[in-house]
C-alpha cells in the first residue's frame, strides 16, 4: 500500500525525479524503512498506454518544455528547441531507454591519470574506483536482470544484429554479441520475456525491459514507505539559515504551489533539469545557486560522442523487427591512443522506423539523393556509436536571461561544442562502421549526425576536492550535507558505455550511505 | 486519414463533381486533381497555391512509388494550419507567388524540372520552404498508408511482436 505523507512531515527524504537514479533510490530507501516522497514532474502513464507509434508516443512521453541551444553541434541548428531526447513521466528516461547495461572500464574512472592533460578538456579522475563499484554493479545487474550476467542468457539476435555480427566477423573484430541488456531473455522478476516487438524507444508494452515505472516504483510503494506524486514539478529547493536544506517548493498536479518539508533532498532530474534547479534555487546565502561553491553546477556537460551509420543492402534486412539495441561490437571501446584520440567507443545496433529515420537520417536534407536512401528502407541496417566525449567547462546548462517557463522561472540553455578529440573519434567510428557494413556488401552508407542527446551527463560532477566539483563520491553535495545528486549529472566523465547501469549502481550505493548517515544522525 | 479521403471521394462521386477544377462546398473548396489521383477540401488555401504545393512536396521528397495522393495529404495538412493561423496561409501563398516569379514569366508549375529544382533551391533558407519541408517529413513518412510502400510494417504489439513474424529471418548473408 503506497504511503501518504503530510506536507509538513520534515522526516521524509524527498527524491526529485523517478528515473534510473530517482526511481531506484526511492525504492532502495523505502526497502530500508526510510520514508520517501518522490516528486515526478511528468504524469504516470502505465505501460499498457504506450503506443507502437514513434511520433505519437514521442509527444506523449517526452520532455518538451521550452529549452534553447547554442554551440557548434548540429542539434542547435536542426533541433534548436530540443537539445535532449528524454522522458517526462513516471519512470523518467527508463521508459524509453534501449536497455544496454555495460560496466565502465577501470581506466574510465581515472581519465586524468590515464589520458593526461588534453588541451581544452576539463578532465578529472572520479573519486571512485571500479573495485569500489563492482559489488554495486553486481547488485544493479541482478536487480535489472541484465543478460550475460547472473547466468541470464543473452537475447536472440534479430536481423539487424545478424548483419552487424557478420560484418564484425569479416573485419576481424573479436568481441561482438547481443549485448548486456536489461531486457528479459526469459521470464524473471515477475516480468515476461522479450517478444521482439521493436519500439523499445516508445516504452516496452510487454514489460520485458527494465524500467523503474513497473519495477522499482511499485516495489517501493508496496513497502508502505514510498509516496510518488506525479505531475509535480519542483521549482526550488529551500534551506535554513544554517545552510541545510529544509524542503522543496513544487507545483502540484493542479498547478498549485506547495512546500514539502524534508530531512534530506536528492536531486535526480537528469543533467539539464538538475543543475537548472540548483541554479534556480539561488538565495541570499547561496547567490550562485545551491551546492555551487566550486562554480561547477551546470558545467562540463557531456552527451557522448555519438553518431549513426545506416547501410543499405541489395536485399531486405527489416531492421525494425525486434529489439532496438540488442547487438554490440566492443573492440573499439578499449584504450588505444594509437588511433589518434583518447577514450573509446561502442558500436551498437539501432533501428528507427520510417517516420523517425526520415526525420533523423540527415536532418534538413531533401531531394532525390536523400529520398533514394529512404527508398531502400526495407534493406537498411543501422548502428549507433557511443563514445567517450571530453568534459569541457564551457559546455553546459545556463539559465536563459529573458525566457521564462510556465512557472515564471528561467528556462535552460544548453551549450555544446565538439572537442577535437570528439571529432577525431566520430570520424574514426564512421569509418569503422562503414567497414563493417561494406564487408557484407553494403551498396550505400550514410553517416548520420547525433540525435538530440539521450545521454546527458556531468553537470553536477563528483570530485575528491570541493573546489573541482559539486558532489563527493556518494553524490552528497560538498556544500550542503543533506543535499544529494542521484542522476547522471554526477558523472565525472562519460566513459564509452551507456550510462544507465552506472546511474542505478550509484543510486544503490548512495541509498546505503544515506541510510548510514541518517542512522548516525549526521544528516 | 485514408478513411476520410475515401469519404471525400465518395462525396465527390455522389455529387457528380467529376471534372477537373474546384467546386464550392460549404465554406471551403473541393479541389480535384485533373488526372483523378487525389481530391482535397480546402478551407484556406486557393486552388493555385494548393496545386503548386502538391508538386513542391513531390519535388522535395520524390518517390516514384508514391502516388500524388500522399503529397496532397501534406497540402491538406498545411491548409489545416492555415485555417488555424492566417499567417501560415499568407506565408504559403506568398511563397508560391515567389516561386512563380523566380524564372521570369513562366509559372513554376510550367517550368522544366531543372528550373523547378533550381528555383526551389533558391528559397531553401526561407520560412516558406522550411514550413513546407517540415510538413513533408511528418505528412509523408508518418502516414501509415505510406509505410507499406517502403516495407515498414509498423506496430507489432497487437500481433504478439515480431518474435514469430520474422525478427531473425534474414537468409542472404551466407551468400555474400
Image: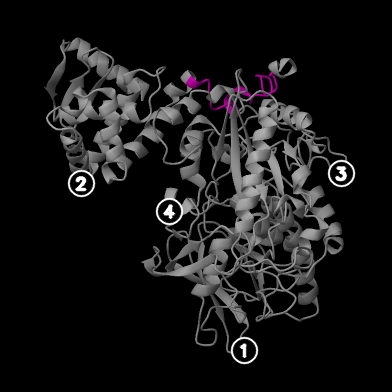
Res. A443 image quadrant: top right
Sort mark 3 into few (<14), some (14-19) or many (20+) by Cα contacts within 10 Å: few
**For mark 4, does the 10 Å Cα neighbourhood hold few (<14), some (14 to 19), or many (20 or more) residues?**
some
Residue under pointer 1: A242
Dot 3 falls on a residue whose secondary structure is loop
Q: Which SS class for mark 4?
A: loop
* Circles 3, 1 touching at the beta carbon (< 8 Å): no
Q: Which residue is mark 4?
A: A80
Q: Secondary structure at mark 1?
A: loop
Crowding at label 2, few (<14), some or many (≥20) Cα neighbours within 10 Å?
few
Which residues fall within the magenta stretch? B150-170
Mark 2: secondary structure: helix
Report the residue marked by disc 2.
Answer: B87
- Please state which of residues B95 and A3 is positioned toward the viewer in this rendering: B95
Residue at point 29%, 33% (across, down): B118
Depth check, mark 3 against mark 4: the one in front is: 4
Mark 2 and mark 3 on one chain: no
Confirm whether the magenta stretch covers residue B167. yes
Q: Foreground residue, A173 or A272?
A: A173
Q: Which is in the foreground here, disc 2 or disc 4?
A: 4
Q: Quadrant of the C terminus of chain A?
A: bottom right
Please provide percent x and percent y for residue A408.
Answer: 39, 69
| Residue A3 appears in the rendering | no
Measure the C-alpha gap from mark 3 to mark 1. Answer: 47 Å
Number of the front mark, 3 or 1: 3
Write down the residue under mark 3: A150
Amino acid at each position: 500500500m503506497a504511503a501518504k505523507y503530510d506536507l509538513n512531515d520534515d522526516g521524509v527524504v524527498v527524491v526529485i525525479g523517478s528515473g534510473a537514479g530517482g526511481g531506484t533510490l526511492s525504492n532502495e530507501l523505502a526497502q530500508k524503512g526510510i520514508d520517501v516522497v518522490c516528486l515526478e514532474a511528468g504524469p504516470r502513464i502505465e505501460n499498457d498506454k504506450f503506443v507502437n507509434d514513434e511520433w505519437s508516443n514521442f509527444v506523449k512521453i517526452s520532455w518538451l518544455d521550452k529549452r534553447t541551444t547554442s554551440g557548434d553541434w548540429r542539434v542547435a541548428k536542426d533541433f534548436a528547441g530540443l537539445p535532449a531526447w528524454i522522458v517526462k513521466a513516471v519512470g523518467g528516461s527508463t521508459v524509453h531507454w534501449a536497455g544496454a547495461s555495460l560496466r565502465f572500464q577501470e581506466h574510465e574512472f581515472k581519465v586524468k591519470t590515464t589520458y593526461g592533460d588534453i588541451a581544452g578538456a576539463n578532465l578529472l579522475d572520479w573519486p571512485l574506483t571500479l573495485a569500489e563499484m563492482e559489488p554495486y554493479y553486481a547488485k544493479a545487474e541482478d536487480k535489472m536482470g541484465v543478460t550475460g550476467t547472473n547466468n541470464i542468457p543473452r537475447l536472440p539476435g534479430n536481423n539487424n544484429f545478424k548483419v552487424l555480427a557478420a560484418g564484425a566477423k569479416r573485419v576481424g573484430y573479436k568481441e561482438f554479441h547481443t549485448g548486456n541488456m536489461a531486457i528479459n531473455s526469459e521470464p524473471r522478476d515477475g516480468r515476461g520475456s522479450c517478444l521482439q516487438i521493436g519500439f523499445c524507444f516508445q516504452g516496452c508494452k510487454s514489460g520485458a525491459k527494465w524500467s523503474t515505472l513497473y519495477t522499482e516504483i511499485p516495489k517501493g510503494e508496496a513497502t508502505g514507505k514510498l509516496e510518488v506524486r506525479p505531475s509535480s514539478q519542483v521549482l526550488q529547493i529551500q534551506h535554513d539559515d544554517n545552510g541545510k536544506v529544509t524542503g522543496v517548493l513544487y507545483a502540484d498536479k493542479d498547478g498549485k504551489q506547495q512546500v514539502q518539508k524534508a530531512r534530506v533532498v536528492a536531486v535526480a532530474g537528469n543533467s539539464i533539469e538538475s543543475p537548472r534547479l540548483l541554479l534556480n534555487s539561488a538565495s541570499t546565502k547561496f547567490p550562485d545557486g545551491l551546492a555551487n561553491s566550486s562554480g561547477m553546477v551546470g558545467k562540463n556537460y557531456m552527451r557522448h560522442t555519438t553518431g549513426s551509420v545506416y547501410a543499405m543492402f541489395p536485399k531486405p534486412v527489416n531492421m525494425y523487427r525486434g529489439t532496438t539495441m540488442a547487438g554490440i561490437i566492443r573492440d573499439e571501446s578499449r584504450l588505444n591512443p594509437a588511433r589518434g584520440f583518447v577514450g573509446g567507443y561502442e558500436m551498437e545496433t539501432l533501428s528507427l522506423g520510417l517516420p523517425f529515420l526520415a526525420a533523423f537520417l540527415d536532418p534538413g536534407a531533401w531531394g532525390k539523393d536523400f529520398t533514394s536512401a529512404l527508398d531502400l528502407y526495407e534493406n537498411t541496417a543501422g548502428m549507433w556509436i557511443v563514445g567517450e566525449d571530453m568534459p569541457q567547462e564551457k559546455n553546459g546548462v545556463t539559465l536563459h536571461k529573458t525566457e521564462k517557463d510556465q512557472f515564471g522561472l528561467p528556462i535552460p540553455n544548453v551549450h555544446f561544442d565538439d572537442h577535437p578529440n570528439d571529432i577525431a573519434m566520430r570520424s574514426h567510428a564512421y569509418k569503422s562502421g562503414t567497414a563493417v557494413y561494406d564487408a557484407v556488401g553494403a551498396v550505400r552508407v550514410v553517416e548520420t549526425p547525433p540525435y538530440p542527446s539521450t545521454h546527458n551527463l556531468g553537470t553536477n560532477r563528483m570530485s575528491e576536492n570541493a573546489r573541482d566539483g559539486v558532489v563527493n563520491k556518494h553524490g552528497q553535495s560538498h556544500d550542503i550535507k543533506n543535499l544529494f545528486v542521484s542522476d547522471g549529472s554526477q558523472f565525472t566523465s562519460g566513459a564509452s558505455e551507456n550510462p544507465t547501469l552506472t546511474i542505478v549502481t550509484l543510486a544503490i550505493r548512495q541509498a546505503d550511505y544515506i541510510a548510514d548517515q541518517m542512522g548516525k544522525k549526521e544528516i | 486519414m485514408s478513411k476520410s479521403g475515401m469519404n471525400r471521394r465518395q462525396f465527390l462521386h455522389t455529387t457528380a463533381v467529376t471534372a477537373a477544377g474546384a467546386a464550392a462546398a460549404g465554406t471551403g473548396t473541393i479541389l480535384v486533381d485533373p488526372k483523378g489521383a487525389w481530391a482535397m477540401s480546402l478551407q484556406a488555401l486557393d486552388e493555385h497555391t494548393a496545386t503548386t504545393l502538391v508538386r513542391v512536396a513531390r519535388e522535395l521528397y520524390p518517390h516514384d512509388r508514391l502516388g500524388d495522393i500522399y503529397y496532397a495529404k501534406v497540402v491538406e495538412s498545411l491548409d489545416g494550419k492555415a485555417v488555424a493561423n492566417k499567417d501560415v496561409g499568407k506565408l504559403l501563398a506568398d511563397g508560391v507567388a515567389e516561386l512563380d516569379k523566380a524564372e521570369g514569366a513562366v509559372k513554376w508549375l510550367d517550368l522544366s524540372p531543372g528550373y523547378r529544382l533550381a528555383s526551389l533551391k533558391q528559397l531553401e533558407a526561407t520560412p516558406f520552404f522550411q514550413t513546407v519541408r517540415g510538413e513533408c517529413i511528418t505528412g509523408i513518412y508518418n502516414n501509415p498508408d505510406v509505410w507499406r510502400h517502403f516495407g515498414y510494417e509498423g506496430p507489432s504489439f497487437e500481433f504478439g511482436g515480431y518474435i514469430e513474424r520474422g525478427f531473425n529471418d534474414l537468409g542472404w548473408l551466407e551468400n555474400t
